[in-house]
Image (tube, helix red, strand yellow):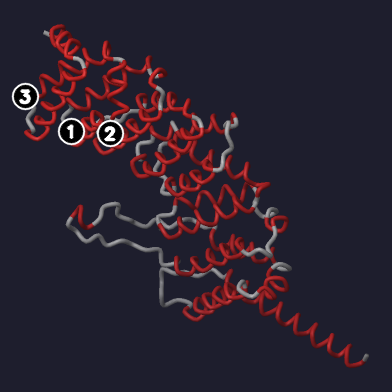
Amino acid sequence: PKGSKREKRVKGSKNKSAKEAFLKKIDAAMKVYDYVDETKDVKGKSERLNAINELQNLLQDQKSVSQLIIPNLDSCMQMIEKNIFRCLPNIKKSNLAFSETGIDQEEETDPAWPHVQGVYEFFLQLIMNDSIEVKLLKGYVTPEFVSRFLELFDSEEAVERDYLKNILHKLYAKLVPRRKMIRKAINETFYQLIHEGHKFNGASELLDILASIISGFAVPLREEHVIFFNNIIIRLHKVQTCSEFFEQLLRCSMLFLTKDKSLAISLLKGLLKYWPFANCVKETLFLTELQEVLEIVDDDKIGDLVIPLFRRIVKCIGGTHLQVADRAMCFFENDYFLTKLRIYKDVTFPMLVPVIVELSENHWHKILQESLVALKVILKEIDSAAFDEAQQISK
């Protein structure tokens, strides 16, 4: 019995010293230093980095997780919050590559980032650990926490935004009771972007998360999801910087249409309403999406939109931007589009034929002029009588 008491004391003191060492690591990881000046607090910064690395290693050992991390989860979350919730540094990142400018851009990096990255890695591994149960974690994921977390998506550091995306995605997957609240907070972030029109660096990462969320929506879609499509996804097209996250926005749009193709009409109206002006890059992207939507929408549903739709395509073909005109010409290689052109030929031919005939004779760009001549032939083959009539009316 005496031996067993001694063993208990030894074990208790071992546990106590392990806990003290653990909390010492947490304290070291919480210390704030000036990373702009590399010569200051060199020893403290090194100790802090070592402590963060050691905390990461503890997550690989399930005994340490159950005996040290779970009982001190409060301290762990405090350390994470103290490190990541900070004023984002104002660093210059160029959006133009060397191939575009011919100038080697010297980009600034956040000197604190290597010291914050380890904390993000610790947080990511913590969420992914099966021993950290939902009931333990959900208390920390409050509306305030999510709101502050989403603000970090405006970071200029692409690596940081990637960590944020992975962490938020894992939290959403793990914390089923918090899903609605997370979706609501993401909605509010996008509302700000839509209505305030400022630049927001993390839009593409948030849309990436949304794409996987939308994929999991059950059909028929719930009313709140249809409202989200109409109020957020469609309206994001009007944001001035939307070309920076267009690929992800297009994916979300198309995922919604695979769930409910009747939403295509709202999207078509939105594209026509928010059509960009004096921005050939964005206009080319809109044409790409327009063509994809027209492949999905039912022919008999677009009657009311035929005139504005073909008026827009005609304007693009006859416009001054070569890339835009070229992209608009691609519509006539698409069978879905040609079917719609035939069905509504009474409306489409009078709009198209005069412009195509005029441009096929007078366009300044030789290659595009050849394409216009070929298009004139296609239109005549579709319906020669309608073609001649349209030409006659214009004269």
Rendering coords of residue 15 (x, y %): 75, 80
Mark 2 residue crowding within 10 angstroms, few (<14) / some (14–19) / many (20+)? many
Which element is circle 1 on? Answer: loop
Q: Gap in Å between the C-alphas at discs 2 and 3?
A: 24 Å
- Which residue does the image show at 27% across and 29% down from the upper left? 277
The residue labelled by disc 1 is 321
- Residue type at the position of mark 3: Asn
Q: Could you tell me if the residues under marks 3 and 1 are in contact, i.e. CB atoms within 8 Å? A: no
Closest to the camera, between mark 3 and mark 1, is: 3
The residue labelled by disc 3 is 362
- Which residue does the image show at 15% across and 21% down from the upper left? 356
Rendering coords of residue 53 (x, y %): 54, 75
The circle drawn on residue 255 is none
- Residue type at the position of mark 2: Glu
Question: Is 112 situated above or below 97?
Answer: below
Q: Is residue 336 left or right of residue 138?
A: left
The residue labelled by disc 2 is 283
- Which residue does the image show at 9% across and 24% down from the upper left? 360
Q: Nearer the viewer, residue 344 or 44?
A: 344
Question: Is 69 situated above or below 342?
Answer: below
Which element is circle 2 on? Answer: helix
